[in-house]
Image: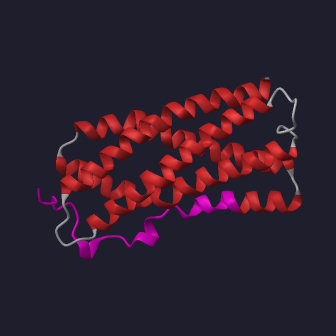
Amino acid sequence: MAWPHVEEAAGAVPLRRQLTWWVLILPVAMGLALARHAVYWLDYTHVMAGALWTGADLLLGFVVGPVLRRLGPRERSAFIRQLVPRTLLYMPVVALTTGTAGWFLANWLGLWTAGRPERNWVLAALVITTILAVQGLGIMLPNNLRILREMQRPTPDADRIWRYNRVNMVLAAVQGVLQVAIIAVMAHLVVG
């Protein structure tokens, strides 16, 4: 299937202008919190990055995915063309910031100490976060790069793009379920 002419390549916005650069504030804030050993700011960074990651996963998995399946090829292609570049930086940054800040928080607060009742809950959070990161960074991000490369070809293959994106949408739904699970774990850790 030939790529529907959604946007002429000459009029396309450069990738560097489509990336969500503002999201880099989170790892910078995390780095400052780590350097100053500021538990409050590290916790704030962890929660903010986690909320942005969880919200995006839930939105993509349970709202965007079903909508995309109902769109025609031209509309679906136009949406994917706009979405993919914006998630290339956003998703890895919020995922890595959330996990890294959470790891340091658990260590700083002594939640890994043997005999602590929270230890198993922190381990559950680590397992879920690892699964989310492997799926996101190991499958979804490479698929997004493949989609971007395919869209840059003179005659992109819309079927190939849709296959890559379909895998990502299924994984986004899986990630949404795992995000709900990790929220339950985090709620238990806070109230516990």
Residue 71's quadrant in the figure?
top left
State the extent of the magenta-drawn residues as a range: 1-27
- In the picture, the quarter occupied by the N terminus is bottom left
At 63% across and 38% down in the image, what residue appears?
A: 127
**110 sits left or right of 127 in the view:** right
At 41% across and 33% down in the image, what residue appears?
A: 62
Q: Is residue 187 above or below residue 108?
A: above
At 62% across and 32% down in the image, what residue appears?
A: 182
In front of the other: 130 or 27: 130
- In the picture, the quarter occupied by the C terminus is top right
Residue 172, magenta (yes or no): no
Q: Residue furthest left?
A: 1
- Percent position (x, y) of residue 86? 44, 58
How many labels sit on residues?
A: 0
- Percent position (x, y) of residue 143? 37, 56
- Percent position (x, y) of residue 171? 42, 41
Colour scheme in use: secondary structure
**Whether residue 58 is visible:** no
Residue 20, magenta (yes or no): yes
- Percent position (x, y) of residue 38? 87, 53
**Whether residue 27 is visible:** yes
Q: Residue furthest front?
A: 114
Q: Is residue 20 above or below residue 185?
A: below
Q: Is residue 39 above or below residue 188?
A: below
**67 sits left or right of 39 in the view:** left
At 71% across and 46% down in the image, what residue appears?
A: 46
